[in-house]
Amino acid sequence: MIYKTKSWSKIKVLGKEIDDFNLAKMFKKNPNRGKDLSLSVADLTFDFSKSRITVKVLKEFHKLAIEIGLQNKVNSMFGGENINSSQNRQVGHIWLRSKNLRPKTINGIEENQDQFLSFADNVRSGTVKGTTGKEITDVVNIGIGGSDLGPAMVYKALQNNHDNKINCYFLSNIDEFENINTFRGLNPETTLIVVTSKSFTTAETMKNALFAKNWLKKSSSPLSVRDHFVAVSTNLQACEEFGISKDRVFLFWDWVGGRYSLFSSVGISIALGYGSKVFLELQNGASKIDQSLKDIDFFNFAPFIHAVINIWNLNILKMNSLAVIPYSSSLQIFPAFLQQLWMESNGKSVDLKGKEISLNTCPVIFGEPGTNSQHSFFQFFHQSPEIVPVDFILIKSQKIEDAEFQNTLFANGLAQAAVLAFGKSKSDLKKEGASKDLISHKFMPGNRPSNILILPRLNADSLGQLIAFYETSVILQGFLMNINSFDQWGVELGKSTAESFLNSIQGEVKLDFDSSTNNLISEFKKN
């Protein structure tokens, strides 16, 4: 329990001392603060100088990491211990991309990867065709949660480099209109459907898979499920019963959690859309972050600093939200991906032994691309009494023709961080000749924290680094707070409850729920 350690006691004392902390004064006191509170990891630059934190606080968090044996916890993950204790599982997503961090007992990763990457390249080259001999031009990825958000986010993020060979679509929600709209305009003869479900029983995924199967059967040409479906699953029997041949079922392991799974065969749609070379570049980028986890100099390790700033914001400054604002439309899905990664991992209220903890463990994550978000909820950021920390994600260069676009995005991101930090004082407004009636309306209090994470460019390698940066921060936060970042029992309960409700909606099962649910089901069945 970190709140029982000497270091945490000192951190809480520092939190009381920091009540009068002012970013404008801190930058004036130390003109080099921007440089001093900035770190690099791999090719990423992490500037945390506009966070409401001091070097003194960071040193105490460094001591805390040593006091609780944080490096040992990281090493236990690499070593294959069952750190997902509530499910008695190992946690090995890092093994998929960093061979040297794998225990010797883990085998078969390269063979599995070669299998699904070779298949993807064969589809792209036209070697693997549909039933009628036509080449595949479109892929529909059917999954939910990590089986959807990770691949969908990466596919969208890299579209500036798309070669137009194969277009990918992502279907997750149990929504008839989404199914209809996804398949509308696609040719069944040239469409490949990827069904991703570890158990091959996930309700949402299987309902959508059956819709796709029926769509295929309605084709004017006799098409085989075996030629137009592949599965990512561990349930070979269920896949074969569905009609998917054994050689088109790509396995993954129970030590790969859904939200950490895009580097496994779950990422086959990325390889289908971009090719194995791009998939391997993505893995290589993530591995660059992994390698720095072997012997961490915590005080100079950017993901650790990011992790402790978030714990500090949540528990000392009592700021319960975090906005993630990527200044690139290509990263539009990244905040949603991060919502699952972070909130499903660390949205917990008990420690590893099941005892209630007295810490806030996870912020509410939300975000949209800049500059769009500047014209919606940034007004709240600048002048609302509630303070929301922000992570700005900026990109130095893009594959573009008009440099002014990228220059404008970068300038806007820096400007928003500066206005949040330094605001606009009433005295400055008076000097500028602002109307007396408008001064209070135009006043910006500032002193609102943000971090800036800069990518050199947006390609597969740097995207892999960005993903691994946040994965590492989330996992380190879990280790520091002594919670399990790898289970999701809240998700499981919701699924099983929905099944019992569905049985009552579709059948004549007696309504035996709470009065609100019983009433609403009765009203629904009248239709």
Image: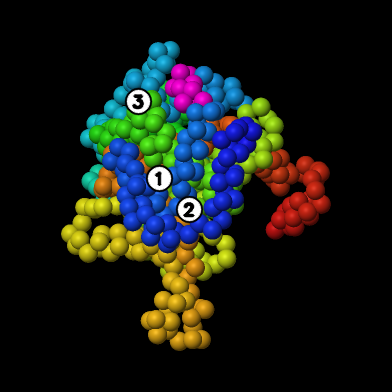
In the depicted view, which residue is nearer to us: 498 or 408? 408
At label 1, the amino acid type is: Ala
Magenta part of the protein: which range?
69-80
Relative to 473, 402 lies left or right: left
First in sequence: mark 2 vs mark 3: 2
**Helix or strand or loop: what does disc 2 sit on?**
loop
| Residue appearing at x 36%, y 52% in the figure | 33
Q: Give x and y (percent) for residue 488.
A: 59, 36
In the depicted view, which residue is nearer to us: 513 or 424? 424
The residue furthest left is 401
Asked which quadrant contains residue 88, the reply is top right
Q: Give x and y (percent) for residue 295.
A: 38, 25
In the rendered view, would you say 526 is above or below 119? Answer: below
Q: How many marks?
A: 3
**Helix or strand or loop: what does disc 1 sit on?**
helix
Query: Which residue is tagged 1?
Result: 152
In the rendered view, would you say 414 is above or below 475? Answer: below
In the depicted view, which residue is nearer to us: 338 or 223? 338
In the rendered view, would you say 103 is above or below 383? Answer: above
| Residue appearing at x 50%, y 38% in the figure | 60
Asked which quadrant contains residue 326, the reply is bottom left
Query: Which residue is tagged 3?
Result: 98
At label 3, the amino acid type is: Ser
**Helix or strand or loop: what does disc 3 sit on?**
loop
Q: Give x and y (percent) for residue 505.
A: 71, 47
